[in-house]
Amino acid sequence: MLLVFAAAPCPAATEEGPAPERFYFLGPHLFPFDHGIAGLIPHDMDGDGDADLLLVDQRASKFHLLLQGERDEDEDWDPAFANELEPDRLIGKREVRVSETLLGHVVGDFGGDASAIVYVTMARELIVECREPEGGRRTAQRFLLELDSSFMGGFEAADLDGSGKPDVVLLAEDALLVFFQDAEGRLSAPRRYPVAKPKSAGLVLADVDNDGRSDIIYCAPSTRYPLRVRLSQADGSPGPEYRFRMPPPGDVTVGDATSDGRNEIALIESTTNRVKLLRWTPQKERPLAGTDTGALEMVPFTRDQKAKMRAFAVADVDGNGLPDVVVTDPNGARLSLIRSQPGQGLTPCESFPSLKEASALVALPGEGGAADLIVCSSKEGIVGVSRYDAETGRLEYPRPLDVGGTPHAIAAARTPSGPALLCAVRAADNAEGGDGPVELVVLERAEPGYRVAARQELDTFREPPAHLTAVDADGDGADDLIAFPEYEPPVLLMRGEDGTFTDVSQRPGFRKHMLRDLKRAAVAALPGAGH
C-alpha cells in the first residue's frame, strides 16, 4: 500500500492570507499495491515539471511510475478536497519491466535524458534506461560487472568530479565501483577502488568537506572504527579511507543541520539512540614523526584466505619518472596500482583484472621508461606481461608468454646482455606420459614482447620451487638465484660464465645452515652494495 500526503498552506491568524512558512498535510490518499514495493524516489519522470514517483516492485521485477495528472487551468480545484478526487485524476500509473531481480537503482540526468533510470540486477549487470521522445523507454547502456557476489552495500549517484553531471557509485563486497559520466552523457567503464573492510554498507554521497564535490561515506561492520569517509580528489577519484572510532551508527546522513552553509554528518548512535552531528574540520599540520624520511601512509587491503599469497613490485609503471606500487590480489584476480604523481604524492589505490591466484609479480624495464609488469599464476599455468595504458589510465590484462611449460615462480635478474626474466617451469609431459622435468627458462626483451633466450634442466628439484629471488651472491655483476621449494630448505644457484645455473648448496664444505631457516622476505639486493 502506498500512502500519499498532499501539503497545503496553513492559514494565518490575520487577514493577509496563508502564511508561506507554515503548512499541513492532507490525506492520506491510498494507492493499493502488492507486497514487495520499495525504493521510493520523487522525480520528474515525464518532463512536465511536476514531481512524479518511482518505486520498485521486487516480486514482479518492474518499476512503477506514478505520474501526476494534468489539470485544466480553468478547472476549479481546491487542495482541501484532494483526497476526494478519483485516483486516476491525481496519479497515472506506468510500468517499466526488467528481466531480473533489482539490487539498486537511481534516477537522474544520464544519456541526455533527465529522467533516466540506472539500475543493477541480480545478474550483476548495470543498465541505463532512457525515455524516448514519444514516451517509450530504451536501454542506452549495459555493463556486465566483474563482481564475485551480488552483495550490495549501496548504489547512489552524485557529481564526484565537479563536471556538473552525476556520476554513479556502487559499493560492492570488497570495492567501490565508480562510473564517471562524460560530456556526451554516457557512463564510462567502471573504475575499481578497494575498500579495507569487506561487506561495508550504508553508502552516502554528499559534500563533507564543503569543496563543491560530493564525497563518499559508508560504514564498516564488526570494527571499532565503523564510520569511513573518502574525500573526492580533483579528478573525482575517492581519496584515502579515513576511519573514525565510535559505536556502530544506526543511520547516517549529511546535510546543513546548523543553517550556516556548511554540511555536517548526522548519525544515530546505536548504543544511546542519540543523534550526533559531526563536522569535517582539517587539523593543523603536525611535524613528521616516526621516520626521518617522512610520514607513513597506510593503504589497507582485504584480509582473505589467500592474503599470504600477495606479491608486490615497486617500479615506474606509468613512465613519469616516479616509482609506483603494484600489489596482487590472488583471491580477487586483480592487480592494485598506487601511482606517484609529481607534487601530489600517492594517488588512491585502483585495481584492474588480472590472473587468478597470482603469487609472483616482478617488474622489468619497458618502452618509454615505463616498466613491464610480469605476473605468474601457477593455478592458470600462465606467466603474462601487463603494461600501463596512458590513454585509458588502466593496466592491461596480462598477455601470456610462451615458456614451454607450466610456470611456478619468476624473478627479474641482471645478466651480461641486460635485464631478463627467469622462470621456473614444469616442462611438458614426457613421452611416457609422466611429468616433464623442472626447467629454468631465461626470457629477454624482444619486440613486441619477450623471447626464450635459454633454458636448462634443474636436476636438483623434483617439484618446481615455489619462489625465486635474484641476488648477485658473488659480486660479478650478474644475478644468481636463491630458490625456495615449498617444503625443503632454500637452494643457492650460481650463474656460471656460460650462463647456466649450478646448485652449489650441495657441494662439500658449503655451509648449509646459512640457508636452512632463510626466509624469502629476508633476501634483497642493496643498491650499490655489489653483492
Image: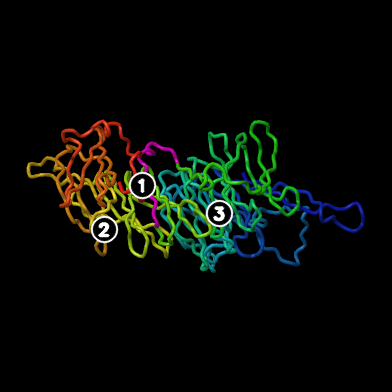
> Dot 2, how many residues are within 10 Å of its Cα: few (below 14), some (14-19), or many (20+)?
few
Q: Does 3 appear above or below 116?
A: above
Q: Secondary structure at mark 2?
A: strand
Gap between marks 3 and 1 measured at Cα:
54 Å
Q: Amino acid at mark 1?
A: Leu
Q: Position of residue 436 (x, y in %)?
A: 13, 43
Q: Amino acid at mark 2?
A: Gly
Q: Secondary structure at mark 3?
A: strand
Q: Position of residue 389 (x, y in %)?
A: 39, 62
For the record, the magenta segment spans 302-316
Q: Position of residue 229 (x, y in %)?
A: 58, 46
Q: Does 312 appear above or below 214?
A: above
- Which circle's residue, 2 or 3, is located before the other in the chain? 3
Residue at 18% across / 38% down in the picture?
461
The image quarter containing residue 224 is: top right
Q: Nearer the viewer, mark 1 or mark 2?
A: 1
Please say which color scheme the image uses. Answer: rainbow
Residue at 66% across / 64% down in the picture?
49
Disc number for residue 418: 2
Q: Is residue 186 left or right of residue 208?
A: left
Residue that label 1 marks: 526
